[in-house]
Structure formats: structure tokens, C-alpha cells
Amino acid sequence: MQPDCLILYVHSPAESVLFYRSLLGREPVEQSPNFAMFMLNDKTMLGLWAAHDVQPGSAQRGGGAEIGITVETDEEVHAAVAAWKAAGWPVLQSPTAMDFGYTAVTADPDGHRVRMFRPTQG
């Protein structure tokens, strides 16, 4: 078994597509009024499903988990934060050194956290 799809429940798939299109630098591979899908890599997809349309229904919303994006340098973390600020996105954590690496966090329109990090070497 290999998990290959992450689905986030969102208020507005169209609004979330704008966020993830900018974050990922690519277009969704599928989009309808209540759902959109992005390829994250060769094997993993990110789905954005209108929360009011989820079956079975769920009261769960964003903020209880994170999407992690690994980068190679601290400068890439700083560049990501600059891009987030320019886009008007929240910076939940400014660039910070932590046990696992150098990191910063933003959130999508529904509060789903996105962590950019350069892993600790060694």
C-alpha cells in the first residue's frame, strides 16, 4: 500500500486553486466547481474538495496538520517567506532554526498549514 493522494476540505476550491497554483507553480490537472486536483510529484496528488460537498460529511477543517515542502537551502526558506508576504499570505512562523531543520510556515485560505523547510544536515 502506498498513499498517493492527500485531500483537503476547503471552503472554496476556486480560491484554494489560486493559492496552490501560486505556491506550487503549476496548474491543477483537474478542476470543477466543487473539486480540484494538483500533481505534487510523479506519484502524489493533492485534492481540494468543497467541504459542503464531502461525503460522508465531516466537521473537520484546516489547521490540524501540515503539508511539508523540503528545500535545499536557508535562502529558499527566506525567498518563500518573501513570496508569501508579497502574495498577502499569513506568516505563521518566520524563518526559524528547529531540531529538524530551518523552517517557516504559512497557511492556505482555509487554515491548512504549509511548512517550507531545509532539513538538518547529518
Image (cartoon, rainbow, N blue to C red):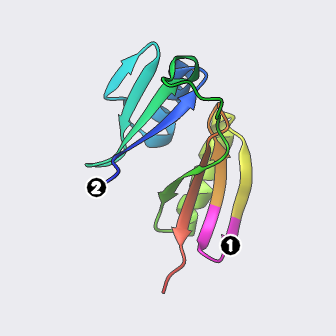
Corner quadrant of residue 45? top left
Q: Which range is magenta?
A: 96-103
- Whether residue 101 is in magenta: the answer is yes
**Residue at mark 1:** 97
In the depicted view, which residue is nearer to us: 12 or 24? 12
> Main SS type for the magenta part?
strand
Q: Nearer the viewer, residue 33 or 3?
A: 3
Q: Quick check: 39 left or right of 18?
A: left
In percent of the image, x 67 and y 43: which residue is there? 63
Viewer-side label of 1, 2: 2
Residue with the most extreme top position: 33
Describe residue 68's horizontal placement relative to residue 94 as left or right.
left
Q: Is residue 110 above or below residue 14?
A: below
Q: Amino acid at mark 1?
A: Ala
Percent x, y for residue 55?
Answer: 48, 23
Location of residue 77 in the rendering, given as x and y in whole percent from the top left corner? 58, 59
Q: Position of residue 95 (x, y in %)?
A: 69, 62
Q: Which residue is denoted by mark 2 in the rendering?
A: 1
Residue in the image at 55% along x and 30% along y: 9
Between 72 and 13, the one lying in front of the other is 13
